[in-house]
Amino acid sequence: MTTESVQVPEAWREGTRPGLPPLLPDFEVVDTFAREIYGRTPSGGRLSDVTLLSRENGVLDGAADRLRHHARISCPLGDLELDTLLHVPSTTGPSPVIVVLSFTGIEETLGSAQSHRWPYAKVMDAGYAVLTVDYQQIEPDAPDARGVRALFPADEPWGAVGAWAWGLSRLLDIADGLDGLTAAGAIALGHSRLGKAALWAGAQDERFAVTISNDSGCCGASLFRHPGGEDIAAITTKFPHWFVPSFASYAGREVELPVDQHQLLASIAPRRVYVASAEDDAWADPIGEYVAVVAAGPAFEDGGIGYHVRPGGHDLLEEDWLRALSFVRR
Ligand code: GTR
């Protein structure tokens, strides 16, 4: 772990952390996270077909093949249609896949103000395929949205973060049937709100061998009980649709939540977790993320959980990908 630039206040150093709930068996804790925060992910949603739309071999100076697919997922009340973008290393054998949702649409990952977040050539070089979809094709990011959540009976509420996590699992279903990818070693990666979704996907779907959260902050990797950055009042006021409606009742009552985020990280063990923070990203509380990683540590075998904090602000940089992937390779 890279800890040198995390200045943890005395009260939050190991052994003296005030009042964090103990680590619990994962089945119990995942259920509590569903009930209190993210909502229960409904079962169902079956991949019905995947159509290849285009294939370009040898892009990125020969490092990758680039494939676009259209996928249809049949849900109880209708079909969800997804347009995916896949990069597969062209020089290696079957590759493990990183599934990651895109904020800005799949074509934007290739050349736009956002493309620095997608260091495809370096990731190909490290031997990983990358499969992505626009997160808002799964569930639009708005309170009155009608995405995948409208395709299931409204028996129990689930928030948009839960819907995006569901989408990461569907990306993995898609990857399962594609040539050039191995089922083993699949990675869920997400930045910010999509880092929250990646952690929730990793906690629920055991096919993910590794979960990587980047600057995921409140309701992601950072502790509710560590003061600093976004809190429940702020997040549920601005983004009420991300969580179950009752979660907002914990605003200002963080200490009464029966869980905290180190338990979400721990619930993924023995599968691996990597948390990346940025020094200037105060809103995501890098110290709260670091302390969560340390507190989750006992649930993992040696080296099962990793962390870095880099200089700079809230963003997903090449450095974040490469440091996370070097943790995965170790
Ligand atoms: C912020 C939000 C954070 C984080 C971020 C993002 O506005 O308060 O929880 O998710 O958005 O997704 O970029």
Image: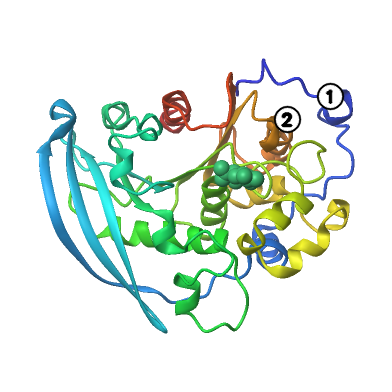
User: Mark 1: is the Cβ under 8 angstroms from ligand 1?
Assistant: no
Q: Is residue 30 left or right of residue 63?
A: right
Label 2: which secondary element = helix
Q: Is residue 175 above or below residue 215?
A: below
Could you say where residue 308 lies in the image, as x and y percent from the top left? 58, 26
User: According to the image, what is the colour scheme of the structure?
Assistant: rainbow
Q: Is residue 177 left or right of residue 27?
A: left
Q: Is residue 197 above or below residue 48?
A: above
The number of numbered badges drawn on the structure is: 2
Q: How many C-alpha atoms fall within 10 Å of the one at disc 2: few (<14), some, or many (≥20)?
A: many
Could you say where residue 146 lies in the image, as x and y percent from the top left? 48, 72
Q: Quadrant of residue 96?
A: top left
Disc 1 target residue: 9
Asked whether 34 or 299 is in front, the reply is: 34
The quarter in which the C terminus is drawn is top left
Amino acid marked by disc 1: Pro
Q: Residue at x 43, y 58 (%)?
A: 136
Task: Check contact, mark 2 vs mark 1: CB within 8 A.
Answer: yes
Could you say where residue 202 lies in the image, as x and y percent from the top left? 52, 52
Disc 2 target residue: 287
Q: Residue at x 66, y 20 (%)?
A: 3
